[in-house]
Image (spheres, grey):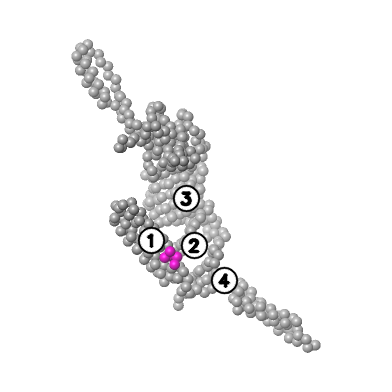
Amino acid sequence: MPYKKKLHQIALDNSNELFNKVKTETLTQIKDNEFEFYELEPFFVQDVLLDEKELPKKRGAPDWKYYGAIKGYWVTDRFKKTFPKGEEWVLPLDPHIKRYPITGEIVVCVNYSWHNHHQTYYTTIVNYRNNPNNSKVSWGNPKLSPVSTAPTFHKPVVANPGDIVIQGRFNNSINIGSQDMVGSSIKLVAHGRENPTYDLEKDAASIYIQDGGNVTVTNPNKKMGSRTVTGKKIILDADEIVINAKSVLRLFGADLVEIVGGNTEIKHNADGKIITGETEKAVDELRERVKKKAVDEFNEKKKEFLGAYVKSAEAFNKGIADLKKLDDKMKNAIKDVEKKIEIFRKTSFTLNATKFTETQDKVNRIQQQMSAQVPVLPNGAPNPEFIRLTKDLLDVFRSFVTLDFINEDIVTIEKKK
């Protein structure tokens, strides 16, 4: 609540009664307009509502309006009430970006009034200790804080002049600044437990997005050594990186796509194929043509909707529903074109060279063994060894007919002449 603090106490010491009366009234006018004005006030946090089970109930269900609300007291006047009258919880001011305090910290509160409604909100956390992990004061009687006070996460992250840094309580940060003073840079980092710097070697996990400067990346394959990455780049660095596409994952590289690893596995799901070969321009054009048609239809509808967005609630909801249908139509169109591609795409199966060589060697070996045998023994009886070898040879020839040495799940796109 805004309040004012008087600056001066003026003594009156004249014996003339009329003079003193006039002087008193004059000085009263002066004093009433001479003060320090406080619009934002410190507020001590005793409790923070971040557990669904502790939320106030509304018609028997948790009232999510209070998620992130705090309870406490004004530092300047512990007995002063918050608004609205009778409300013990103070809501965050911004509904989108929230900095939840911990118990024992001081936040800045402000009162706003409109249409006879008065509401107290909390804003930022007071930087009592310049400690990113917690800014708890040494007095007060809050609930036990869930944030550790161990010194592991106490250091502010190292920055350069002009940087904008958003730092969490647990040695994680976003840095918006420059790289080598020549290019813009955004770094999203979970720092090592004792590391407040930006260093790929020491960071626990990092994403660097930059349009200049250079960064050295150490290849886990020690034989490969380090590599300097320059220019426009995105670097992901961690012990384990997972890119999970629920539908389609595409990796494009104009000049090079390089995969280096200890054990490198390329596998497919059941009934899938691994397709190798030259890029198919016709297929890519077909995909984009079908997609563009659907996207153009969607954008036209969106433009029409935004141009007349001031409508009734019913018309607004119908417009949103129409856009959703067109968005689903785009996804289905892309799936359908993949089925058409499989029909006319010309591919050839990949030969399992080892299996083919083994089959060919077996033919040669059996034929050599048969050349040392006679079909009929001297007594006129059939030669059982010759019969056995003949059967083995037929089995091998059957492998040629059934193409057992072909990998049907690894196919190559036929190269155009």
- The earlier-in-sequence mark between 2 and 4 is 2
Picture quadrant of residue 401: bottom right
Q: Position of residue 323 (x, y in %)?
A: 37, 58
Q: Which residue is mark 4?
A: 407
Q: Main secondary structure of the magenta part?
A: helix
Closer to the observer: label 3 or label 4? Answer: 4
Q: Is residue 291 left or right of residue 405?
A: left
Instruction: Report crowding for label 4: few under 14, some 14 to 19, many 20 or more residues within 10 A (C-alpha).
Output: some
Q: Is residue 143 magenta?
A: no
Q: Is residue 128 visible?
A: no
- The earlier-in-sequence mark between 3 and 2 is 3
Closer to the observer: label 1 or label 2? Answer: 1
Between 286 and 185, the residue placed more toward the observer is 286
Q: Which residue is mark 3?
A: 206
User: Type of residue at label 2?
Assistant: Glu
Q: Position of residue 315 (x, y in %)?
A: 32, 54
